Amino acid sequence: MKYLYLSLLMVFSVLMAKAQVSASGMEAPGQSRPWQTSELLEPGELNDLITKNKAPLVLNLGSVEDIKGAVHIGVVSDTANMAKLKTTLAAKPKSTEIVIYCGCCPFGKCPNIRPAYKALKDLGFNNIRVLNLYVNLRTNWTTQGYPLAKNN
């Protein structure tokens, strides 16, 4: 019985460690994450910037609702939307503060965040933040009462 209890405790500990990794915006083992932890932006921080009318350029790279003030690009796994991303930024200075999000699913499964981040880096943008929607937009933004665009 003692060994069963210890085994269950170890399984629980491993699961909690994985949950903490996901909650920090980091990837599970085996997943690459091109952005630095310092490039993550917490939802509450972006909400504060929006409230103070100091929001950076926010780009929605997914199929989820638009955050208030966001430019809807759409899923960048679609080549037309990747082209739209590049066209949207063509005239912007490389120092433009940009926040990207998808929000369809956890980072470890998201088909849009990594290619968009890489494309922005390849285009020379150097002030990119990734909105830390480590579960999804609904959980980490909407249920917190943070604003969506009025047309949603």
Image (tube, grey):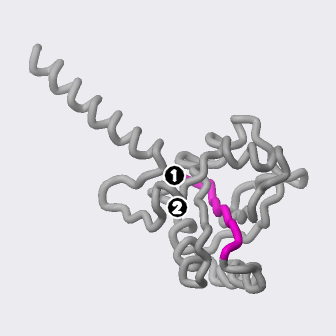
List the residue tagged with mark 2.
110
Asked which secondary structure carries label 2, the reply is loop
Q: Amino acid at mark 1?
A: Pro
How many residues crowd around disc 2 within 10 Å: few (fewer than 14), some, or many (20 or more)?
some
Q: Are marks 2 and 1 in contact (CB under 8 Å)?
A: yes
| Quarter of the image that includes the N terminus | top left
On residue 106, which mark appears?
1
Left or right of 116: which side holds 143? right
- Rendered view: 37 above or below 61: above
Judge by depth and name the residue closer to the eye, 34 or 126.
126
How far across and down, in percent of the image, does residue 132 sit? 57, 50
Q: Residue at x 17, y 18 (%)?
A: 5
Left or right of 6: which side holds 86? right
How many residues crowd around disc 1 within 10 Å: few (fewer than 14), some, or many (20 or more)?
many
How far across and down, in percent of the image, does residue 16 sit? 35, 33
Q: Magenta part of the protein: which range?
A: 95-105
Q: Amino acid at mark 2?
A: Cys
